[in-house]
Every structure is written in structure tokens, then in C-alpha cells.
Amino acid sequence: MKVLLVGNGGREHAIAKKIAESPVLTDFFSTPGNPGINTLAKVANTQNTPESIVDWAEKNSIDLIVCGPEIPLVAGLADAAADKGIPVFGPKKIGAMLEGSKIFSKKFMEKYNVPTAPFVVLEDYEAAVEYVKGHSQQYPMVIKADGLAAGKGVKIAADEKEALDTLHDYMIKETLGEAGKKVVIEEFMPGEEMSVFYLTDGKKFIRLIAAKDYKKVYDGDKGENTGGMGCYAPHQSLTKDVSDKIENLIMPGIKRGFAEEHFDYRGILYVGLMLTKDGPKVVEFNCRFGDPETQGIMPLIDEDVVTLFYQAACGNLEHEDIKWKNMFAASVVVASKGYPGSYEKGKEIFFETDMKDYIHAGTKESNGKIVTNGGRVLNAVATGNTKAEALKKAYELAAKATFDGCFYRKDIGS
Ligand code: AMP
Ligand code: GLY
């Protein structure tokens, strides 16, 4: 099978490693790829648009497109490929809107009784300011930009000043562009987070192992939200009781909604949960695998992922369940100073071991050297028979790659 992988981050490198092991793989391409992915796949010379990717796939007789990130899916990659009869692992635009618009996803949850935080939608600045001024008892207050913002569109405001500043940034200064012109304001839910993933062909939903992502930039969950600074899997708070609640209270509404809205959703549904004292509640949906959760999940799958992805993409998932290695995995993100704010790129990375020992997230090759090219630069990933062993190995690896201004959280797994 000829596979084209779309994306250039750590998540895609982790997926690429698993695809490269597949016994049914005959040819493997990636676009745009990165120095890690490029050790496994040939670079497909496409532009970064659904049309260009699908065009290239058609000309090169690609059997399956696997899409890592959300942006191409929200832009309609799966729709464009469906017109040419090319299966895509990733939903069509309508399903991807569960991630592409917080307003869409919150309204979906409301309509189908999926437990989530109570919310209001505010489409203009004056109304949002009035709402904030009228709800002085509601802190911390969660303010979410409606559109895609690479994990930077959520502010947990501690007081009215922070809330008003956030509205001004999002809606007047447009610091997130179009994405922040409308907002959702919702109740803060205290609890532990859990990233749960379903592999689906639109009809059958197979739950993967859950992961714990560490979203805040600094140790002790301090500082700004990021895309994720590390993870471990499987999540140890996924008890039988939590699992039953997810399947009995959260999933029925989602499944009914998918059917009634005709999403024809083929790929991964990422259900971000908060384990509150009143049971699990949905924080967000994403239309793709998590990053960095995937870096922890992929090494534990004991299956051929190309077959799984292909079946899902064709709307015909034959598996009832997925086999897993009885191990733990941990991933530590090595980031650039300044992330998730502004940071410099182009710093040379020095590897004490082989650069292939790492999952590459924000790297590029420049004059024969590997240099930084993003906020989250590398993932140090390891597996072990215990969580402690996986973490110890991941941290040993994290310490062996350095660049000017590199840092990582020291408390992943705690
Ligand atoms: P989201 O993009 O909606 O997942 O939000 C990003 C992060 O903000 C989440 O992973 C949580 O850590 C935090 N967050 C979002 N909504 C809430 C909420 N209602 N209560 C508590 N934390 C939240
Ligand atoms: N790690 C969070 C996400 O992928 O959205």
C-alpha cells in the first residue's frame, strides 16, 4: 500500500515510525515532513493546500492519505480526496469543525446532552465585556477563542482585569486573527485531565489507551497553556468506574450526534476530558491525534496501523478491539526558550546520541546541521515495564539533546 502522511510535527513523526513498520506498506511519502520523518519517508513535493495534496496523491497512485494535523482537515482535505476516490484517515470538514469551532462543538454537546461546562457564546466585544462585568462571582473564568489557535486560544482568567484584557486581545487587537473574533465563555471545571482517543469509521468507535498530557509550560502546572509539554500512557486514572462513566454518560450522545448530523467521520476523535467530582466532562474535541499524546500511544500499539487506518478511512473498520503492549510510555517535550510565547529559531541542536533516537517536532536541516524550527523541538520518548522506568529513560534521553535556550518540564508523570 502506498501511503502519504500529511504533517511535520512530533505527532506525525511518531505515526510515521509506526507506519514504517507496517507489513502492507509498499511506498511511503510525507508532506511536508521534517528531518525525523524524512529518515522514514520520501518527501512529496506538494503545496500546503488540500487541492495540491490530493492532486499529488492522485498522480502518484496513493492508496491512503493519513492526516496528522487539524488545519488540512478543517480546510477540507478529506472532502477534496473523496471527490477523487482517495481514502483519508481524518474526517471531512463538517466533522473537523468539532475542533475548528468551539461554538460549533459546544452547541453539538448541548444538543446531544454530552456533559460539558456550562457556556455562553459571545459574538461581539461589547456584549462580551457586559457579560464579564455582570459575572464577578465566576472566577476563574474560562475564555475560549472560537477558531483554531494552535493551543493558544484559551485563557483561564483569574480576575476581571485578566478577563477584560483577554477579550480586548482576542476581539479588538485580534492577536489570534479571525480565530478570536468570537468567543465562548465557560465555567471553570476543577479536576484532572485525560486525553481519550477513539478510532472510528463513523459507525464503530474503538477506544485507544488514554494518555495524560501536561499542558502548562512550567513544573507544577504553572504558566501559560501550551500544546502539551509531555505525557505518559496509559493514563492511570482510567479506572473501571471512569471508563463506565465515559461509555455510559459521554459517548452515547456523541455517537447519536455523529449519526444524526451525518458526519461520516473517519479517523480519530480526541475527547479531552476533565475528571470532575461530578464525573467526567468534555473540555474539548479534536479531530485528530493529540500531540504529544501520540508520541506515547504509538509505541504501545501492537497492531499494524496502516491496516487500521485504511479500514477506518474506507468506512469499514473490521476490528472490534486493538491489541496493546503491556507497557508504559513517556514523552518529554524539549522546548525553545520563550515558548509558548515568541522564541528564536535556527539554534543548532547537539545530540549526544543519534538524532534518530528522538521524535522530531520542530526541527529542520540547515547546511548539514539539525536546527530548531519551532517552540516544541524534540520529544524524548521511552517505554518501560513500569511508568517509573519509562519516565526515567525518557528523562535520560531528554538530557542528551541540547541547544541554546532549551528547557523541559521536570515533573512529567507526577
Ligand atoms: P481546550 O482548547 O478547550 O482544550 O482548552 C485548553 C486547556 O485549557 C484544557 O486542556 C484545559 O487545561 C484548560 N481548560 C479549558 N476549558 C476548561 C474548563 N472549562 N475548566 C478548566 N480548564 C479548562
Ligand atoms: N496535546 C493537546 C492536543 O493535541 O490538542
Image (tube, rainbow, N blue to C red):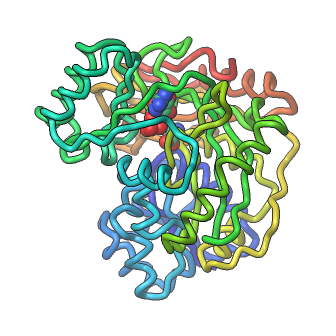
**Quarter of the figure with the N terminus:** bottom right
Q: Is residue 271 above or below residue 68?
A: above
> Image check: 373 left or right of 64?
left
Nearer to us in this view, 24 or 118: 118
Identified at 53% across, 71% down, the residue is 260
Nearer to us in this view, 234 or 30: 234
Identified at 57% across, 35% down, the residue is 379
Identified at 27% across, 26% down, the residue is 342
Q: Is residue 9 above or below residue 97?
A: above
> Image check: 250 left or right of 368?
right
Identified at 43% across, 52% down, the residue is 105
Q: At which x and y percent is residue 89?
A: 55, 68
Q: At which x and y percent is residue 115?
A: 57, 42
> Image check: 309 left or right of 302?
left
Q: Is residue 233 above or below residue 288?
A: above
- Residue 227 in view (yes/no): no
